[in-house]
Image (cartoon, grey):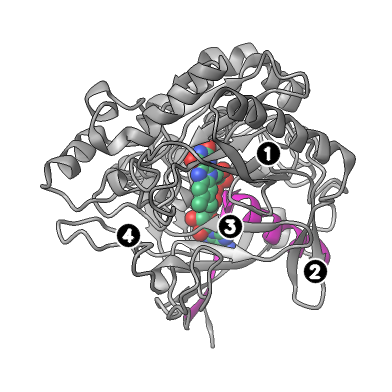
């Protein structure tokens, strides 16, 4: 198949938090850019059936696969919202689609406390600058807010109130966490004028009511409205390499249909290339390019310092508390000061399949586990594999810290017990592989390759809390340099 040839000033690969923020800031500066996104668009409309649901999952739940770890159902092959990739010691769940993982997240937007931030990112980023400038900017861009009182006190959020009550009994401080949720739409779900989604805890494959403030409806929508950003969905980037003469980059991509069949092959040549394909996608493209000799001078640390601070826990034995309802997460437990084994965060989240009548509380926890993972290139498949030393004593210590918090909760809430607690064996929160300040400078410019930038979660070795807000804040920061470089070339 012959390749179609194109040119662009700037090409962005991927439309998650990094790619969307880069697109918006470039557009505001009047810069034209092409954004290549492998996934499809997910327009939410009044029919209320854009996404698959847990009750009746279909191919929309998974990226080009008949299976998903989130359902036992056999799926039709479709360009669905979540890619699942098996690794060694840890598997990865990666969002796909225009808007990236924001389509299907719990939407929790957490800023790590100063001490945690310094521990994970302090060697490259100044906490004060991030806290005073870039986190507020990220929150404003995403438009997040905690659960409002009327929604919190409704019948649908009994599980959130139950968790807060358990925390109070254990003396563990908590907050209502910022969420990328449109609460007016949740009110419409409650009133029966929109399809029930968040109030039934249905968000893992996307939110049919439109209550999710996903990037395609917020940051990226603003970028596209400017007329400067040409978003090309169903465009899978397969390879990147420097253009002849050292002026920019060739980006090879394939246009696919919604079953993954290749329709056309393209090569687009751009003066500047921004990789925002997410942790999995950016590591894939860069490690492949180093192995093939296309980008041989990439730093030896590429693929390293991969972190996942996610722990899934489930406790049972409480009074009936609507564990199946009331999403997304609303309550953030901050066991940051009193836990002798390390600062632990726990966020309740609904479990639509929870056994009825047994009073379950499911949480997603985070603890600052060291970034010991590494992506390595596998020549047999020309793909990357995540290697995670699950038995490392440092990870066991992190696991014990979570256990300490859960024990306190169980002691203070007689009858309750821990049914499950494990540092993510399947991580949606995996970050790292392109350490900021090592493989790139502190502004995401790839060392040794002028005009090549990374703007996404792969820059971070972990955050100790769910990462999306930090990914967005760092994206806002590094994008300010990108825009300066494009508008006023050095
Ligand atoms: C199910 C799930 C739930 C989560 N819940 C939360 C939460 O509640 N709170 C939180 O803080 N974090 C959460 N996270 C993590 C958070 O969503 C990510 O950290 C964040 O989205 C990372 O942003 P990003 O810009 O790095 O990339 P992503 O959002 O992953 O976007 C990358 C984009 O690049 C595209 N892409 C990849 N490869 C290619 C290619 N070769 N060609 C073209 N396009 C490509 C992908 O399709 C995707 O759209 C969750 C993640 C998942 C998967």
Horizontal side of 193 relative to 201 (left or right) equals left
Using a 10 Å C-alpha cutoff, classify the residue at mark 1 as few (fewer than 14 neighbours), some (14 to 19) or many (20 or more): many
Q: Circle 3 sits on which residue? A: 93
The verdict on residue 461 being magenta is no
- Residue displayed at 65% across by 18% down: 336
Q: Which residue is mark 1?
A: 309
Work out how far the residue at label 3 is from the one at label 4, CA to CA, in angstroms: 18 Å
Which mark sits nearer the N-terminus, 3 or 2?
Answer: 3
Q: Residues within 10 Å of mark 4 (few under 14, many from 20)?
A: some
- Quadrant including the C terminus: top right
Q: CA distance from mark 1 to mark 3?
A: 14 Å
Q: For the residue labelled by badge 1, is the local secondary structure a helix, a strand or a loop?
A: loop
Does 474 appear above or below 201? Answer: above
Figure disc tally:
4
Q: Earlier in the sequence, mark 1 or mark 4?
A: 4
Q: Is residue 21 above or below residue 238?
A: above
Residues marked 1 and 4 touching at CB (< 8 Å)? no
Which of 143/464 is in front?
464
């Amino acid at each position: 198949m012959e390749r179609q040839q194109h040119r662009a000033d700037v090409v962005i690969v991927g439309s998650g938090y990094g790619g969307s923020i880069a697109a918006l800031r470039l557009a505001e500066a009047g810069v034209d850019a092409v954004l290549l996104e492998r996934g499809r668009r997910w327009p939410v409309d009044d029919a209320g059936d854009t996404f698959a649901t847990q009750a009746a999952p279909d191919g929309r739940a998974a990226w080009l696969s008949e299976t998903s770890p989130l359902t036992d159902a056999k799926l039709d092959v479709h360009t669905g919202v979540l890619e699942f990739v098996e690794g060694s010691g840890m598997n990865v769940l990666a969002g796909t689609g225009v808007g990236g993982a924001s389509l299907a997240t719990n939407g929790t937007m957490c800023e790590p406390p100063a001490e945690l931030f310094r521990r994970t990112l302090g060697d490259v980023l100044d906490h004060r600058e991030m806290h005073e400038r870039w986190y507020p900017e990220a929150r404003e861009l995403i438009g997040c807010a905690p659960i409002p009182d009327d929604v919190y006190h409704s019948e649908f959020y009994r599980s959130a109130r139950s968790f807060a009550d358990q925390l109070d009994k254990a003396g563990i401080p908590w907050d209502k966490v910022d969420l990328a949720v449109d609460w007016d739409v949740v009110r419409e779900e409650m009133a029966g004028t929109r399809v029930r989604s968040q109030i039934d805890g249905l968000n893992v494959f996307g939110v049919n009511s439109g209550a999710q403030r996903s990037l395609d409806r917020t940051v990226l929508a603003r970028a596209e409205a400017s007329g400067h950003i040409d978003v090309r969905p169903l465009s899978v980037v397969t390879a990147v390499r420097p253009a002849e003469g050292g002026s920019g980059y060739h980006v090879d991509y394939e246009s696919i249909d919604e079953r993954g069949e290749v329709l056309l092959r393209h090569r687009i040549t751009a003066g500047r290339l921004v990789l925002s394909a997410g942790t999995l996608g950016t590591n894939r493209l860069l490690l492949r390019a180093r192995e093939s000799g296309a980008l041989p001078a990439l730093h030896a640390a590429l693929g390293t310092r991969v972190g996942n601070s996610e722990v899934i826990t489930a406790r049972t034995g409480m009074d009936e508390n609507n564990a199946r309802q009331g999403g997304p997460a609303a309550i953030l437990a901050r066991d940051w000061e009193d836990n002798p084994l390390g600062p632990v965060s726990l966020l309740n989240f609904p479990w639509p399949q929870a056994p009825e009548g047994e009073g379950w509380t499911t949480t997603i926890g985070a603890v600052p586990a060291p970034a010991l993972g590494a992506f390595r290139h596998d020549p047999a498949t020309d793909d990357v594999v995540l290697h995670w030393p699950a038995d490392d004593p440092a990870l066991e210590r992190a696991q014990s810290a979570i256990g300490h918090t859960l024990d306190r909760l169980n002691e203070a809430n007689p009858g309750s017990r821990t049914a499950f607690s494990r540092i993510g064996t399947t991580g949606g929160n995996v970050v790292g592989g392109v350490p900021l300040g090592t493989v790139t400078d502190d502004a995401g410019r790839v060392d040794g390759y002028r005009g090549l930038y990374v703007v996404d979660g792969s820059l971070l070795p972990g955050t100790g809390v769910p990462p999306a807000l930090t990914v967005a804040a760092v994206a806002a920061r590094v994008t300010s340099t990108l825009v300066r470089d494009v508008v006023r070339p050095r």
